[in-house]
Image: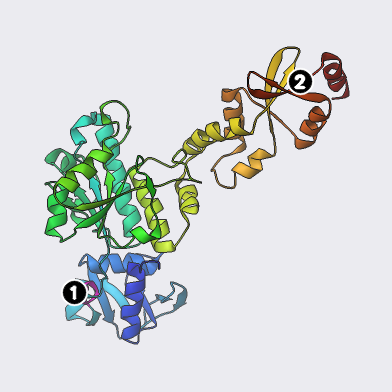
Amino acid sequence: MAMKTLAEVFREALKEKGIESFGVLSKRFRKSKNKLQDVAVEIINGKGAVFRVPEKTAVAWDLNGNRVEGSHYAYAPLCMTEKFEMVLSPEELRSKLPEWPYFIIDLYHWDKHTQKEKGKVCLQVSQSYGLLRDYYTGRELAVTWANDEFKRMFKGPIDRITPYAGPTAEFLKEKDIDEVVLLDPWAEEVLSEKDFDVGAFIIGGIVDTGGNKKKTTPKIGEELERAGIKVRRRKIVLKGDIVGVPDRINRILGIILKMMVEGKSMDEAVYEFQEPLHARWRLRKELPKRAIRYKVNGKTYRVIEKELFDEYSRWLKIRWEDFVKVLRELDLIALEKKRIHHLNKISNARIINGKLYRVILLKKAAMLCYNC
């Protein structure tokens, strides 16, 4: 079952009070794509509340975020308490929040990064906050081993996330969490909806996993197990393979949220957060499997169907130029299906050194070129 968002909690709280629409007293939130979510985040953070106002607001929305003619209820800053009657306070809305899991970025390996890489970590943490804020409150983002350097370099709203200076195990014990999911590309099991019942998801705070940072994620799990915490190691895959899955911290978090909150399949969620770079990684692995080897006058040509672009672009975020780029890198030739069919008609199948080739005699090849 998909997990309730903050916007849904806010909607239910307003409905309970018989409120069908609400407005704002300023121009804020007018361009917001999710009015309920953005207003609710501000209320949770103690910036304002919902008040009953004597005159209808100029702008208002119903509880699905659609524009309606004014409302007698409005979001306004807390300083309006003396002027208007408060109907939904920050404390009341907070009391209705469900037990959302924590999403922990573990910075144990912070010092293994260069200054530039540390900047990337900070950016990805900030983007992770933005993703969580679109569904929950953003405070579910915990950053463990958050030292002074991280806090100095972090450009996001540090007061709206949960930074923790100590180890992840200590943080979990303070929150009474005894079982977690560790996102680990080297895990044997794949993440599924059966794993969404844990109190925390842990993503290793690693960027550029080469050199001394290789295979550091499993070590995070070992540390937690030593501290008596049960760890489910899980990986995210695309059609059964980790190749093509984004490796940025915020994109991994985004995939989990798409599955957990929106009920999307893993393949759909990966596609949404994939970049052409990741898609090309996967394409390099897929295309050689579909190549047909032709031998003409002793020279080998590896040919694939041009129509494969349509097939792969359904689940890989590739553009035609990405397809062509990978073809060139792999020294493959793309031909239309009907031309391949013609090549197969004028060639003979032979096994050479354990591999299947289609051999075209030179005369036939010349005829083929003449007919092109």
In front of the other: 246 or 239:
239
The range drawn in magenta is 89-94
Going from N to C along the chain, the mark reached first, 2 or 1, is 1
Task: Tell me: residue 181, above or below residue 20.
Answer: above
The amino acid sitting under disc 2 is Val
Task: Tell me: residue 148, above or below residue 45.
Answer: above
Q: Residue at x 13, y 56 (%)?
A: 173
Q: Is residue 31 visible?
A: no
Where in the figure is residue 67, as x and y percent of width and height? 46, 74
Q: Residue at x 35, y 87 (%)?
A: 18
- Residue corresponding to mark 2: 359
Q: Residue at x 32, y 74 (%)?
A: 10
- Residue corresponding to mark 1: 91
Residue 92 painted magenta: yes
In front of the other: 71 or 259:
259
In front of the other: 272 or 28:
272
The amino acid sitting under disc 1 is Glu
Q: Tell me which corner region of the image, top left, top right, bottom left or bottom right, holds residue 112.
A: top left
Q: Which element carries disc 2, helix, strand or loop? A: strand
Task: Tell me: residue 341, above or below residue 237.
Answer: above
Where in the figure is residue 79, as x and y percent of width and height? 18, 72
Q: Residue at x 36, y 41 (%)?
A: 185
Q: Is residue 308 left or right of residue 211?
A: right
Quadrant for the N terminus in the image: bottom left
Q: Tell me which corner region of the image, top left, top right, bottom left or bottom right, holds residue 63.
A: bottom left
Where in the figure is residue 289, as x and y percent of width and height? 60, 33
Q: Tell me which corner region of the image, top left, top right, bottom left or bottom right, holds residue 223.
A: top left
